[in-house]
Amino acid sequence: MSKLDFKILKQKWNARVWQITLNGITLTTPVFMPVGTKATIKWMILDMLKDSKYIWDLPQIQLILANTFHLYLRPGDELIKAAWGLHKFENRDKLILTDSWWFQVFSLWLWKTDSREWPEDQHEIKMKLTEEGVNFRSPYDGSKHEFTPEGVVDIQCNLWSDIMMMLDVCSPAGADRKTINEHMQITHRRAKRAFDHFTPKYKKSKGVLFPIVQWWTYLDLRQESIDVLSTYALDGIAVGGVSVWESKELIREVVAFTASKLPTNVPRYLMWVWTPEDITHAIEEGFDMFDCVLPTRLGRHGEAFSADGNIKLSNAKYSKDFTSLTSDCWCYTCQNFTKAYLHHLLNEKEMLWGILLSLHNIVYLHKIVEDWKAKMLKK
């Protein structure tokens, strides 16, 4: 029996509003999840996400992410377990999802394969994919590590995650069909190992475990993977590889196809989707959960979401613009500060600019999904 309670509130065509209850916390989907990679959302205090002073009259943000890969390396999952789990460690009384570690290893490895200059303060990751798992070096100190399907489950159990992701393979851009098919078969074998390992722990563990469907734009491979991985989707299922260098048209095609084939009685998590238009499209196709680090990353680089496209506050034209950041958002930033002030903070490299813009970008996407739910429930 699933320990994640998922029940319908309203559905029209493919779009749906459902209620999730897990570990005493209840939220409604669809939901955008801010990313707190290293047990924090960069430059923010987590309590801001549940304080009406900062998010206006919107519901509290009940679910955020943390990153298995980075927390395993520093400060270590055993340390976090000794601190009574991630919730106590970061003082977060809401739900936490720990994402699949694979994309972090994969993306760091690409620094070399993509001929980009490796950051001076980081070691090369030197990743090697094996049947057993993956061998890699830490980007922090160059130490050697191995992740296995079973080990990644144990790490996330140590973190006391509410929602955990299985160990998958995210094929690199440009990989041929043969390679992608090989990676898919590895992922299917890993899924069996992960869930066989997790099943005896299920009742005693805090969290639930989602399988992940990948395989780029090959729709037949998507179908095959859904057929295999749906057998493990007791509590939910995730879909990845739909926003990593593909065109928007291909993303839309894959999202629509995949959503129509997924199990209907569990939450559906679409990974790494963040633009307002892409989130809205995915909601209408039947996805429930979304995440991406870019809203806060863009905020730290001086960009803010708006209905007319991103506002780049480094632009000199904002130096004497005394209007509010946007007129369609009522977050703390939009209520209290002008573009001129934010431009000034950015020019002076005062970190307050990153705090205020990250807050705005998170609330902006949160408002989009909450407004969509409100309209759906009124119909």
Image (spheres, rainbow, N blue to C red):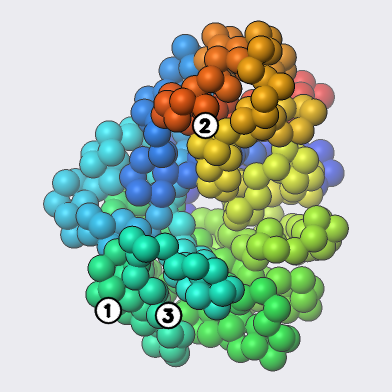
Residue that mark 1 sits on:
144
Residue that mark 3 sits on:
127
110 vs 341: above or below: below
Disc 3 marks a residue whose amino acid type is Met
Which label was assigned to residue 221?
A: none
Disc 2 marks a residue whose amino acid type is Ser
Residue 88 horizontal side relative to residue 293, left or right: left
Q: Is residue 169 visible?
A: no
Reading the chain from its start, which is encountered first: label 3 or label 2?
3
Name which quarter of the figure residue 243 lies in: bottom right
> Mark 2 and mark 1: span between their CA atoms?
34 Å
192 vs 313: above or below: below
User: Please, what secondary structure does the residue beneath circle 1 have?
Assistant: strand
Residue 300 horizontal side relative to residue 224, left or right: left
111 vs 187: above or below: above
User: Please, what secondary structure does the residue beneath circle 3 have?
Assistant: loop
> Mark 1 and mark 3: span between their CA atoms?
10 Å
Q: Nearer the viewer, residue 12 or 58?
A: 58
Q: Find the residue positioned furthest to the left.
A: 82
Number of residues whose C-alpha sits closer than 10 Å to that of mark 2, classed few (under 14), some (14–19) or many (20 or more): many
> Mark 3 and mark 2: span between their CA atoms?
32 Å
296 vs 261: above or below: above
Residue that mark 2 sits on:
358
Q: Residue 185 appears at what percent x and percent y?
A: 59, 86
Residue 113 horizontal side relative to residue 144, left or right: right
Name which quarter of the figure residue 217 lies in: bottom right
Disc 1 marks a residue whose amino acid type is Lys
User: Please, what secondary structure does the residue beneath circle 2 have?
Assistant: helix
Q: Residue 242 appears at what percent x and percent y?
A: 69, 62
Q: Residue at x 24, y 48 (%)?
A: 85
